[in-house]
Amino acid sequence: MFDKVKAILAKQLRKDPATITLETSIKKDLGADSIDILQLLMRIEDQYGIVIPDIALATFETVGDVVAYLEKQEQDAMS
């Protein structure tokens, strides 16, 4: 899951994937603004066929936050 999110972020924000870790701040380290984050989430929603509520969106500060959310959604779907 991390590799997929990292690839999307790297491509969208034109960053070196090697510099992106779970602890990377989406806004501070990657320089993403609210539109970048919205586009990222739309790509993830399309790719995984899920809808990410606005309330969850507000909690995403690091790449790890996004990965943890997606892994939880995937796990819940399998239950």
Image (cartoon, helix red, strand yellow):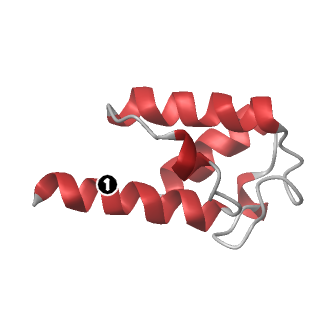
Count residues near mark 1 (Cα–Cα under 10 Å), then give few for <14, some for 14-19, many for 20+.
some
Residue at figure coordinates x 69%, y 63% from the top left:
62
**Which residue sits furthest left?**
79
Q: Name the residue under label 1.
A: 73
Q: Where is residue 13 in the image (x, y as percent from the top left)?
A: 79, 37
Residue at figure coordinates x 68%, y 43% from the top left:
9
Count up the numbered dots. 1
77 relative to 12, above or below: below
Residue at figure coordinates x 18%, y 51% from the top left:
77
Q: Is residue 74 left or right of residue 61?
A: left
68 relative to 52, above or below: below
Does dot 1 land on a helix, a strand or a loop? helix
Q: Position of residue 20 (x, y in %)?
A: 72, 61
Question: The disc labelled 1 sits on which kind of residue?
Answer: Gln
**Which residue sits furthest front?**
55
Quadrant in which residue 28 is drawn: bottom right
Q: In this view, does 40 lie to the left or right of 16?
A: left
Residue at figure coordinates x 56%, y 40% from the top left:
54
5 relative to 18, above or below: above
Q: Could you tell me which quadrant the C terminus lies in?
A: bottom left
Quadrant in which residue 8 is drawn: top right
Q: Is residue 18 left or right of residue 79?
A: right
Q: Could you tell me which quadrant the N terminus lies in?
A: bottom left
Q: Position of residue 25 (x, y in %)?
A: 78, 63
Q: Is residue 66 left or right of residue 51?
A: right
Q: Where is residue 32 in the image (x, y as percent from the top left)?
A: 83, 43
Q: Which of 73 and 7 is in front in this view?
A: 73
